[in-house]
């Protein structure tokens, strides 16, 4: 059995294998994760991210991020809230959109906005769009994200959700070499129950969690 990088249980077995790497699935939390031996070195990982062309002036990209921003703002209500966009990437955009709505925004990215000071605060909400699937040590990052949210606050994720093995075998999402941690609805429900969160799924790839404790 392979140890799970999210819940730390030793209950993960082989889920899928292709020409590039092996994937395991945890029997406890249902996380699907790439073989740790296949993870890219930091320089190689960043080289992939450097090719991303995220632009806050791109209306299509704004519409894409609006799938998270719109339902989150509905739940936040007041614009006096403070938020952090975690994994903001080379062209921070969601933080710009939310700042335009009056929210006090901070950003963090290990490669493009490495400011550890922002991780020592608490926020009314934390967003993480198309980033959680990149987490090499998801237990560490998950603990950090939940700790940064005030009681009653919100976590907002955007990520494609893993389903069954047959669908995974033909899933383009797994082919990105920087995608290494694949969450499912079952995974988020497990974490919500364990960590005192209320979870809500909005569409196919937006997950909102409210911190109740």
Image (cartoon, grey):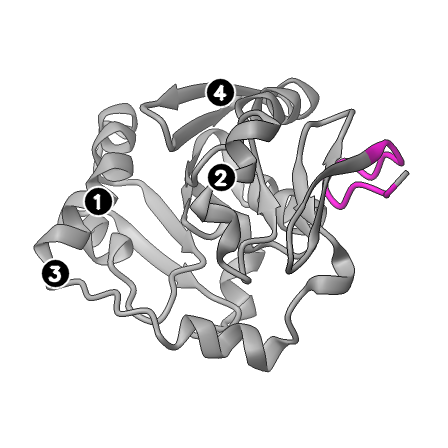
Q: Main secondary structure of the magenta part?
A: loop
Is 93 placed above or below 101 here? Answer: below
Residue under label 4, please give it.
Answer: 199
In depth, the one of 17 and 9 nearer the eye is 17
SS class of the residue under badge 2?
Answer: loop
Residue under label 1, please give it.
Answer: 64
The location of residue 136, given as percent across then percent down, is 66, 57
Direction from residue 22 to residue 160 in the image, left or right: left
In depth, the one of 191 and 133 nearer the eye is 133
The location of residue 52, given as percent across then percent down, is 33, 69
Direction from residue 191 to residue 116 in the image, left or right: left
Instruction: Give me the C-alpha separation between circle 2 and circle 4.
Output: 28 Å
Q: Quadrant of the N terminus?
A: top right
Contact flag, marks 1 and 3 (Cβ < 8 Å) = no
SS class of the residue under badge 1?
Answer: helix
Label disc, if present, on residue 170 of the rendered structure: 2
């Amino acid at each position: 059995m392979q140890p799970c990088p999210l819940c730390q249980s030793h209950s993960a077995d082989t889920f899928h294998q292709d020409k590039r790497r092996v994937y395991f699935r945890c029997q406890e939390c249902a996380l699907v994760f790439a073989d740790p031996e296949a993870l890219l070195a930091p320089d190689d990982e960043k080289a992939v991210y450097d090719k991303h062309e995220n632009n806050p002036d791109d209306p299509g990209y704004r519409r894409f991020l609006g799938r998270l921003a719109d339902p989150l703002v509905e739940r936040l209500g007041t614009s006096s809230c403070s938020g952090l966009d975690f994994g903001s990437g080379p062209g921070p955009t969601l933080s710009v959109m939310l700042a335009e709505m009056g929210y006090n925004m901070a950003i963090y990215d290990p490669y493009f906005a490495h400011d550890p000071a922002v991780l020592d605060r608490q926020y009314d909400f934390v967003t993480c769009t198309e980033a959680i699937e990149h987490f090499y040590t998801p237990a560490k990052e998950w603990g950090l994200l939940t700790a940064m949210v005030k009681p009653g606050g919100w976590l907002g994720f955007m990520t494609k959700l893993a389903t069954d093995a047959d669908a995974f075998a033909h899933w383009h999402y797994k082919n990105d070499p920087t995608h290494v941690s694949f969450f499912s609805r079952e995974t988020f429900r497990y974490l919500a129950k364990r960590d005192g969160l209320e979870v809500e799924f909005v569409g196919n790839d937006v997950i909102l969690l409210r911190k109740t404790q």
